[in-house]
Amino acid sequence: MLSEQFVNLLNTFDPIHLEQMDRVKLMNRVDTKFAFDIKVLVEILPELAKHYFVLEINTVRIPSYQSQYFDDKNLSFYSDHHNGRTNRFKVRIRKYVESNLLFLEIKHKYKGRTNKKRIEVDDFKSTLSSEMNKFITDNSITKSTLLPTLENAFQRITLVNKTRNERLTFDFDLKFTREDSSKEFKNLVIAELKQEKIDRLSPFFMVMKNRIIRPYRLSKYCLGAIELFKDEKIKMNRFKRKYLYLQKIENHAC
């Protein structure tokens, strides 16, 4: 039912296509995340239609994404985030399912800004090739051998502001997998506003403010790691309040 609602709601948006997205690549940017119930997304989409285009790929407006994350055996990337390091990295292979494109991506978070670099690859990997390792080390990552840690899959709606240089994504229907374990979040939406610099006059910022939904910092990778490494006593004390809040959203308790 919700998927039908989304299709109908997104039909009220003017489309934008991949070849028109150059102005909002924003490979160096400021990201602001929000988390809320999927029912809220149904409510706010009509408020956003006049301000944003919706990305359409081969007639699809709700494409599917898959990611394979890499970390060292000590989960150092996760720990850097948990410990609040302002200079930290994330390494993943991202698959754009409908277009069948895959990229090895490095996200470098430094003093509040996100810088993303990527190279095209052919598939998910059980081990990184020499070319991939060179790309990683050339981007100042000095961790020991990186291994596949977990995978996730989700659906995404991408909106592009009609007048401002900003992009907005809504990720939902999240599923995390690791070996034989998995965890799904069916009711949680993670929104991410990507801007050159923080602009609180953004229409989406105003919509969130009107609903008293405040920015929320917890990456999908960290959420998946918390869920799938529980039995290994993963450190999560600094994330506990955020994690419990996301669980409340998933259970329609917020």
Image: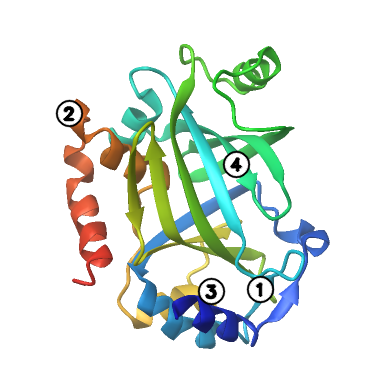
Lower sequence index among marks 2 and 3: 3
Question: Secondary structure under badge 1?
Answer: strand
Amino acid on which the number 3 mark rests in the picture: Ser
The reply to whether discs 1 and 2 touch (Cβ–Cβ < 8 Å) is: no
Q: Identify the residue at horizontal 46%, vertical 73% (top origin).
A: 205
The location of residue 5, given as percent across then percent down, is: 50, 83
Question: Secondary structure under badge 2?
Answer: loop
Q: Quadrant of residue 177?
A: top left
Amino acid on which the number 2 mark rests in the picture: Lys
Question: Looking at the image, is mark 1 or mark 4 nearer the viewer?
Answer: 4
The circle drawn on residue 20 is none
Q: CA distance from mark 1 to mark 2?
A: 41 Å
Question: Secondary structure under badge 4?
Answer: strand
Lower sequence index among marks 1 and 3: 1
Horizontal side of 2 relative to 244 (left or right) equals right
Question: Looking at the image, is mark 1 or mark 2 nearer the viewer?
Answer: 2
The location of residue 196, given as percent across then percent down, is: 61, 56
Q: Which residue is labeled 2 in the image? A: 233
Lower sequence index among marks 3 and 4: 4
Q: Identify the residue at horizontal 56%, vertical 18% (top origin).
A: 127
Q: Which residue is labeled 3 in the image? A: 202
**Residue 146 in the image: above or below residue 233:** above
Q: Which residue is labeled 1 in the image? A: 54
Q: Which residue is labeled 4 in the image? A: 94
The location of residue 72, given as percent across then percent down, is: 41, 19
Q: Residues within 10 Å of mark 2 (few under 14, many from 20)?
A: few
Q: CA distance from mark 4 to mark 2?
A: 28 Å
Q: Nearer the viewer, residue 149 or 141?
A: 149
Q: Identify the residue at horizontal 48%, vertical 33% (top origin).
A: 69
Q: CA distance from mark 1 to mark 3?
A: 16 Å
